[in-house]
């Protein structure tokens, strides 16, 4: 603990050296008082029942503070982020007198997996007690606790309190102890495909999507993307046409996250973008499978139904429970993912307005993956570099700046490309170089032929120089068709 505040992830209070103005000082003092009283009420609730006189006195003191925040600031949001407590988006600077209470409240909220409690309207004593007793009776470590707490409050008619689960930041915790990021990525990838499959099946049976699980998976993907984007980008080479719909949704989410990361999005915005990518085609769950997989051209009625899936997806998203206050850009992103930059495409917008950033990002990710993925009814696909060339020529289809960012991510020779090197070696691109100067010099896994067997060789970086000749050791001569050379790209990423 620092002298006048709580440490952040880097070990320092971000604003500990800055003087506080009078409003900040008042907010900090009231916040400390609130934590002290919340600590006492949580402790007392473990000893006495709701009718105890001592409990009533503590509850009244806390209630006055809560309602003061509501009257002065319009709402009260208490949120846990890593080892910090935020009150109305301001990190609480903890004094010596409130440190014990702070640690207890922080530990309890983490144990109960409750990340945020938002109070939107004036509370009475009964509402406050129900919140505390329900929360303290939750089992430690249950990932569904926030939902259970919210459901319990809703059943009592308490609509003024909203609860969100604890946001997970550490990959090891999310991935059940996988310390190898590559193994963690594989597990997340396949679990997410399974989740989307369950969600689509459930929608057909009028069941709800588990929004809490959806958000946790996207948070895990964001953590991996920030750590090493090549882990998840490599897995997009998995092209299972039997599971196309589900595989495609996950790939679109990954490509979208990669673009968002390069644009400098916050983790919160990246999580929203990832969820938008995963749900962008959810409206197709209402379209008969025989239309989705029809090998022939769709007739007018079938095409009309197909063009409705973005709007259907928006309607379905708005009905998802526990998604919290869904960002409007998520719903709009789903609506816009088949619209071109010149507003051609579908569905036709009511007003002429530029596409949102989410819509333009999802459009690029969706189109690229669709062009490079075989379907049940269409086995012929474009190689990655062919798909990019076509997209570049579509001047009215894609945002040119975002497309340039995307090409910078996947490279001129995208991850999963089979290439012939100028040394007459063959290799598979497994990671692009982030420096635009080396966009045509990715990292490659060499493939060699020995005694009639193909062997996977070492990984090489094509920007590596030959010290004596002061030239590159290797370069790409051309891209190859994996089918023609009977190379299974997938085996290099699993």
Image (cartoon, helix red, strand yellow):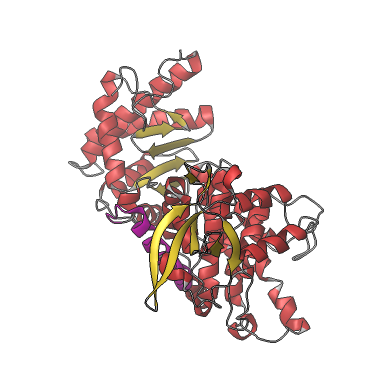
Residue 321, image x, y percentages: 49, 59
The quarter of the picture where the N terminus appears is top left
The quarter of the picture where the C terminus appears is bottom left
Q: Which residues are magenta?
A: 176-198
Residue 443, image x, y percentages: 48, 53
Residue lying farthest to the left in this orientation: 47
Residue 222, image x, y percentages: 46, 50
Residue 356 position (above or below residue 102): below
Question: Is 319 left or right of 39, judged from the image as shown?
Answer: right
Residue 411 position (above or below residue 7): below
Front in this rendered view, residue 362 or 461: 461
Q: Count of labels shown?
A: 0
Residue 438, image x, y percentages: 57, 46
Q: Name the residue at 42% across, 24% down.
A: 14
Query: Does the magenta stretch mainly form a helix, a strand or a loop?
Result: helix
Q: Is residue 278 visible?
A: yes
Front in this rendered view, residue 311 or 379: 379
Residue 105 position (above or below residue 413): above
Question: Is 106 left or right of 233, judged from the image as shown?
Answer: left
Front in this rendered view, residue 118 or 472: 472
Quadrant position of residue 155: bottom left
| Residue 382 within the magenta-colored segment of the rendering | no
Q: Is residue 276 visible?
A: no
């Amino acid at each position: 603990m620092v002298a006048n505040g709580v440490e952040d992830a880097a070990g320092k209070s971000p604003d500990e050296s800055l003087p506080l103005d009078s409003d900040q000082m008042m907010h900090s003092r009231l916040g400390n008082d609130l934590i002290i009283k919340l600590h006492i009420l949580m402790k007392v609730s473990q000893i006495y029942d709701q009718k105890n006189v001592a409990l009533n006195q503590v509850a009244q003191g806390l209630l006055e503070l809560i309602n003061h925040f509501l009257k002065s600031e319009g709402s009260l949001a208490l949120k846990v982020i890593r080892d910090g407590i935020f009150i109305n988006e301001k990190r609480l600077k903890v004094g010596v007198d409130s440190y014990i209470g702070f640690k207890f409240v922080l530990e309890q909220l983490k144990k109960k997996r409750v990340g945020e409690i938002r109070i939107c309207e004036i509370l009475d004593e009964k509402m406050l007690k129900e919140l505390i007793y329900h929360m303290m009776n939750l089992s430690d470590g249950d990932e569904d606790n926030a939902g259970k707490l919210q459901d319990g409050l809703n059943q009592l008619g308490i609509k003024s309190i909203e609860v969100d689960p604890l946001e997970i930041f550490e990959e090891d915790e999310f991935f059940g102890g996988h310390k190898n990021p590559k193994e963690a990525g594989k597990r997340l990838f396949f679990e997410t495909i399974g989740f989307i499959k369950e969600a689509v099946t459930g929608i057909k049976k009028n069941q709800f999507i588990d929004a809490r699980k959806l958000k946790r998976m996207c948070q895990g993907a964001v953590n991996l993307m920030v750590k090493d984007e090549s882990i998840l980008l490599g897995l997009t080479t998995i092209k299972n046409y039997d599971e196309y719909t589900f595989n495609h949704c996950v790939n679109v989410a990954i490509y979208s996250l990669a673009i968002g990361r390069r644009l400098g999005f916050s983790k919160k915005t990246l999580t929203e973008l990832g969820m938008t990518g995963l749900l962008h085609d959810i409206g197709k769950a209402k379209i008969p499978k025989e239309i989705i997989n029809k090998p022939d051209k769709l007739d007018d009625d079938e095409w009309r139904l197909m063009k409705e899936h973005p709007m259907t997806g928006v309607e379905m998203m708005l009905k998802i429970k526990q998604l919290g206050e869904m960002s409007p850009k998520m719903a709009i992103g789903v609506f816009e993912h088949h619209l071109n930059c010149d507003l051609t495409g579908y569905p036709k917008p009511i007003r002429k307005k530029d596409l949102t950033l989410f819509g333009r990002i999802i459009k690029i990710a969706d189109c690229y993956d669709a062009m490079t993925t075989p379907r049940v009814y269409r086995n012929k696909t474009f190689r990655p570099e062919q798909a990019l060339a076509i997209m570049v020529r579509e001047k009215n289809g894609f945002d040119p700046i975002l497309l340039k960012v995307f090409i910078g991510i996947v490279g001129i020779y995208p991850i999963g490309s089979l290439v012939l090197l100028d040394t007459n070696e063959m290799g598979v691109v497994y990671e692009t170089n982030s420096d635009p100067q080396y966009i045509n010099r990715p990292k490659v896994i060499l493939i060699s032929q020995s005694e009639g067997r193909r062997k996977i060789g070492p990984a090489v970086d094509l920007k590596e120089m030959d010290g004596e000749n002061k030239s590159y050791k290797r370069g790409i001569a051309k891209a190859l068709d994996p089918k023609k050379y009977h190379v299974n790209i997938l085996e290099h990423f699993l």
